[in-house]
Amino acid sequence: MHTRTRVDTTPDQPGFVPLTSYREYPAADMVHRSREFAADMQRRRTVREFSDRPVPREVIEACLEAAGTAPSGAHQQPWHFVVVTDRTIKRAIRAAAETAEAEFYATAPAEWLAALAPLGTDANKEYLEVAPYLIAVFAERYGRAADGSRIPHYYVMESVGIATGFLLAALHHAGLATLTHTPNPMGFLNEILERPPNERAVMLVVAGYPAPGVRVPDLNRKPLSSIATFR
Ligand code: IYR
């Protein structure tokens, strides 16, 4: 059944405005656009070696603006992104991440290490100093009112996850390679990046050009038939 709601002539609910940004496309265009987008996303690959070639800051700014359009619980936008280009800060992040990772690789369950083996990861995180941008993603677990009291935030991890997904898609769309790095534990990011205790570091997104000649694991993605069910 197709339903079409009559354009409403009742008085506007306060705080609501007409949806003017929405664009409808003819069905054939939708098919084309969705296929093109999927094909472009299929070209996205995580890389673990980056070039140090500079990337215009404006690209990163635009990608962060795209990330900031993510839907969020109660529209609280509970995210903060710290963009690191400073060499000294990168070096400090690398040192702390490698310390954490050395411990991880020395003590992680064999099963976990076996699952990672095809990716060729290890405790050496040279890319944290080489790539032009490290973007630390922080989740605002709660907010602060003007009087200092806590404002509860809702669906924080879901919201930040969506925003980070938008960021990765935007960076890829712009022509940059990315790597999602989750040092474990990553509390050191609060200290190095001087973020307040209501924020939890959830991820480091490394962005830049891939190193020339970089190789990536020969992975397959699950086909549609195994990731989706239509009923
Ligand atoms: N955080 C470690 C280990 C690691 C874990 C998973 I799960 C990965 O998909 C990749 C790496 C590291 O960054 O090396």
Image (spheres, rainbow, N blue to C red):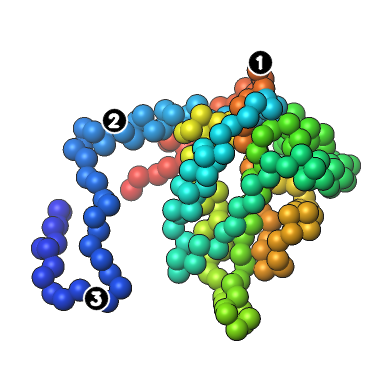
Residue position for label 3 = 13
CA distance for labels 2 and 3: 37 Å
CA distance for labels 1 and 2: 32 Å
Q: Residues within 10 Å of mark 3 (few under 14, many from 20)?
A: few
Q: Is residue 206 left or right of residue 23?
A: right
Tell me if residue 222 can be seen.
Answer: no
Secondary structure at numbered mark 1:
loop
Pick whichever of labels 2 and 3 is earlier in the sequence: 3
Pick whichever of labels 3 and 1 is earlier in the sequence: 3
> Residue furthest toward the top?
213
Q: Quadrant of residue 104?
A: top right
- Dot in front, 2 or 3: 3
Q: Which mark is residue 111?
A: none
User: What amino acid is labelled 1 in the image?
Assistant: Gly
Residue position for label 1 = 213
- Identify which residue, 221 or 35, lies in the foreground: 35
> What residue is at 13 percent from the left and 74 percent from the top?
10
Residue position for label 2 = 32
Q: Is residue 185 left or right of residue 50?
A: right
> What residue is at 82 percent from the left and 37 percent from the top?
123
Pick whichever of labels 1 and 2 is earlier in the sequence: 2
- Dot in front, 1 or 2: 1
Secondary structure at numbered mark 2:
helix
